[in-house]
Image (tube, helix red, strand yellow):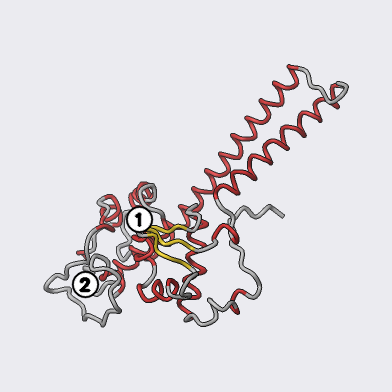
Amino acid sequence: MAKDKRLYMTFPNDFWMHPKIAPLSVEAKWAFVEMNGYSRMQDLDGRIPAVMMHRMWTAEVVAELVGSHDERPLMFHDSAADVYVIRDYAQHQQTTADREELSEKRSIAGKAGRAKQLADNSGASGGQVSGQNWAETETETETETETETETRSKDLTISDDHSFTEFWSMWPRSEGKAAARKAWTKAVKIIDPTPLLVLVRAYVTHPNRPAGEFIPHASTWLNGERWNDGPPVARANTQRPTKGAPANVTPQNEWMFR
């Protein structure tokens, strides 16, 4: 069976019974799991920018997590950096530094193993390797590194393709798929796919979203970075009934949570 290369989070078996977790609402508990996963995926080491926090989770949920303990809440707001910090993240989840250290150890162990193999094959004594053999070992290492890089690049492309499929399934106007795919590839270099999908969903489900022929092509919306625009403005003949909206997160983002 092929090795699973996905990233993972770790939580203790009694996570749900922890005194800080047990009293939380179901929404807050699940949001905390999502926040750990998002931080892991984006290499944030438990420090989530406030702008992304407010785009992806409601103000009530954030307030519940920040208020989970008087002195040591599950997370707190670092106002100087304007980020929300998951407390003790490095004690429970693998950090960027952890992964880099592990990668370096594996690289050193791999070089040592290949050097020993070459030494054994060439009959060298004392574990010494000739200059030629060492050069061959270095070449093999470089080739392997390039292969690993290509694999990661391929995995990223596959991931982007999955996110585009989700985007395309949401977009109301199914025209110009090839142009939309190209625009999506460009867009996810500017903003990560996960928050972008949140913003797309907010747009396409908004009661004032244009209908029918007034919907822009997907490529037009993406290339114009329209996810940064305010809420859709209803046309006279296409306005839909307005539903009640939850409490605002910020004045700029309130439309996304209706």
Q: Residue at x 41, y 75 (%)?
A: 61
Q: Is residue 222 visible?
A: yes
Relative height, residue 71 to residue 146 (above, below) = below
- Helix, strand, or loop for circle 1? loop
Q: Residues within 10 Å of mark 2 (few under 14, many from 20)?
A: some
Q: Is residue 168 visible?
A: no
Q: Amino acid at mark 2?
A: Asn
Q: Residue at x 59, y 34 (%)?
A: 146
Q: Residue at x 29, y 78 (%)?
A: 247
The C terminus lies in quadrant = bottom left
Q: In the rendered view, does 30 fall on the left or right side of 92?
A: left
Q: In the rendered view, does 67 fall on the left or right side of 119?
A: left
Relative height, residue 35 to residue 207 (above, below) = above
Q: In the rendered view, does 225 fall on the left or right side of 116?
A: left
Residue 12: x, y in percent?
Answer: 64, 70
Residue 5: x, y in percent?
Answer: 62, 52
Cα–Cα gap, marks 1 and 2: 37 Å
Q: Which of these two is toward me, 91 or 54?
A: 91
Residue ranking furthest to the left: 236
Q: Residue at x 27, y 66 (%)?
A: 253
Q: Which of these two is toward me, 241 or 92?
A: 92
Q: In the rendered view, does 168 fall on the left or right side of 30?
A: left
Tag 2 residue: 208
Residue 249: x, y in percent?
Answer: 30, 71
Q: Amino acid at mark 1?
A: Ala
Residue ranking furthest to the top: 131
Q: Which of these two is toward me, 151 or 161?
A: 151
Residue 201 numbered mark, or none: none
- Helix, strand, or loop for circle 2? loop
Tag 1 residue: 80
Residue 232: x, y in percent?
Answer: 21, 66
